[in-house]
Amino acid sequence: MSAPPRVLTVAGSDSGGGAGIQADLKTMLALGVHGMSVVTAVTAQNSLGVQGAWELPVEAVRAQYRSVVDDIGVQAVKTGMLASAELVEAVAELIAGTDAPVVVDPVGVSKHGDPLLAASALDSVRTRLLPVAAVATPNLDEVAQLTGVRVESEDQLPEAAAAVLAYGPQWVLIKGGHLTGDAVDLLTDGSEQYWLRAPRHDNRHTHGTGCTLASAIASQLAKGRTVPEAVAAAKEYVTGAIAAGYALGGGIGPVDHGWTFRPQEG
């Protein structure tokens, strides 16, 4: 039996299992690819928030990356929580030398509003990480953090996309999930535009949506899909995962990464 496509996540660990490396690997399993990981930081995290975070040394991150890529190889890479300028720059250098599409989720804050990226690292994300991305997937808070553009309505999404594209990614997916109404995202490379809409589910248990979406895109790219095809399939997967999200602990529960394995009602 031949091995499935291989996808590498470079991100932080979520001890609660809803986001980060844990969400990435669950998504990859659900979508039929072999998931591998480079841990950049360890968090103490649960449904109520992030109680602590400790980044790993650059040499530990570099060693994990080289160990996986040089022996096993990758068909796609996804980046998440990178914590510091030093880590951002090291990871950007590593992925620039890797012949595989990279999905950059420019993680700035957690679902609960806890900071996951040092303010001093923002310039490194703009100038080093975004230029090597095949797809960047910022939410509206991250757009504001990176570009200063604040989106309050759907018709401002193209402006936000242009501001992010100015830093060099091939494609940008502006996630409009924080707006009211349907969950609408805009995918564009500056010439083509794809508007992706999905009904908004009345479910507060959405921890890990950003990690899950970016990992789903990377998984689809590893299978050989184009960026528009990969993003559309990933949007469908994460919409189902949100609909099936469940309560854990006393706060915001996770999306259900295994929803495709379970019998669907109706």
Image (spheres, grey):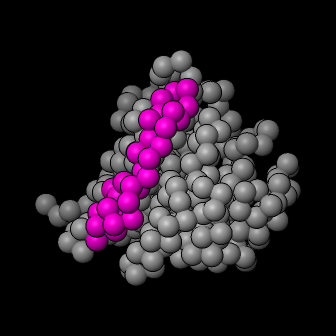
Report x, y in % for residue 153: 85, 49
Q: Relative to the observer, which residue lies in front, 5 or 109?
A: 109
Name the residue rendered at 24%, 75% in the picture: 70
Q: Relative to the observer, which residue lies in front, 86 or 15?
A: 86
Report x, y in % for residue 150: 83, 54
Residue 171 visible: no
Report x, y in % for residue 135: 57, 67
Corner quadrant of residue 43: top left
Residue 118 falls left or right of residue 218: right
Residues shaded magenta: 37-66
In this rendering, the count of numbered labels is 0
Residue 166 falls left or right of residue 247: right
Q: Is residue 61 on the magenta stretch?
A: yes
Report x, y in % for residue 73: 27, 71
Corner quadrant of residue 148: bottom right
Look at the image and tell me in which quarter the N terminus lies.
bottom left
Name the residue rendered at 69%, 44% in the picture: 177
Q: Is residue 237 on the magenta stretch?
A: no
Residue 67 visible: yes
Q: Relative to the observer, which residue lies in front, 44 or 111?
A: 44
Name the residue rendered at 60%, 70% in the picture: 124
Q: Does 250 sit above or below residue 244? A: above
